[in-house]
Image (cartoon, rainbow, N blue to C red):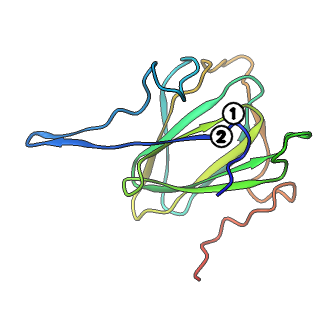
Amino acid sequence: MELIEGVKIKKLNFIPDERGRLMEILRCDDEIFEKFGQVYITTAYPGVVKAWHAHRYQDDNITVIKGMAKVVLCDLREGSPTYKKINEFFAGEYNPILIHIPKLVYHGFKCISENECIVLNIPTQPYNHKNPDELRLPFDTEEIPYNWERRNY
């Protein structure tokens, strides 16, 4: 799949031993790392879509740490070489990846597991409660040609 301009993927790996598992998600010496803003989690119940939003100033670094989610990105940056391109990732317990989402790229996710999914985000800026850095569109906007329904091929 051709990635949207500025999107980066880091394959994550578990390091198991007899006590359990460890997985490094983002390190300051990773090529994908830019800057630390904060760390937070968000969740969704099965079938719930949380979309669409983008940021003017921050980049996001997201991974699904519990369950599975369909993470979808859309480039609405006019003048971008990947304008109107959509990327779709199935991320979570069965495909541990970190997705770097550049500013102004719209994104969202849908929980596709049988139980609640937990998404961890490490954005490059802390959340500003008085002036949130968020651009929002409805999940079913006509501006983004994407259908969140499950496809049964």
Is 69 situated above or below 19?
below
Mark positioned earlier in the residue sequence (1 or 2)? 2
Q: Is residue 38 left or right of residue 15?
A: right
Looking at the image, residue 91 sits to the left or right of residue 130; the answer is: left
Q: Position of residue 30 (x, y in %)?
A: 47, 25
Question: Element type at marker 2?
Answer: loop
What amino acid does circle 1 point to?
Pro
Position of the C terminus by quadrant:
bottom right
Which label was assigned to residue 7?
Answer: 2
Secondary structure state at the residue bearing disc 1 = loop
Q: Residue at x 39, y 59 (%)?
A: 115
In the rendered image, which residue does mark 1 sit on?
102
Q: If the image is split into quadrants, where does the N terminus sit? A: bottom right
Give the quadrant of residue 94: bottom left
| x and y, in percent, of residue 129 in the image | 66, 19
Pointer 1 with pointer 2, Cβ within 8 A: yes
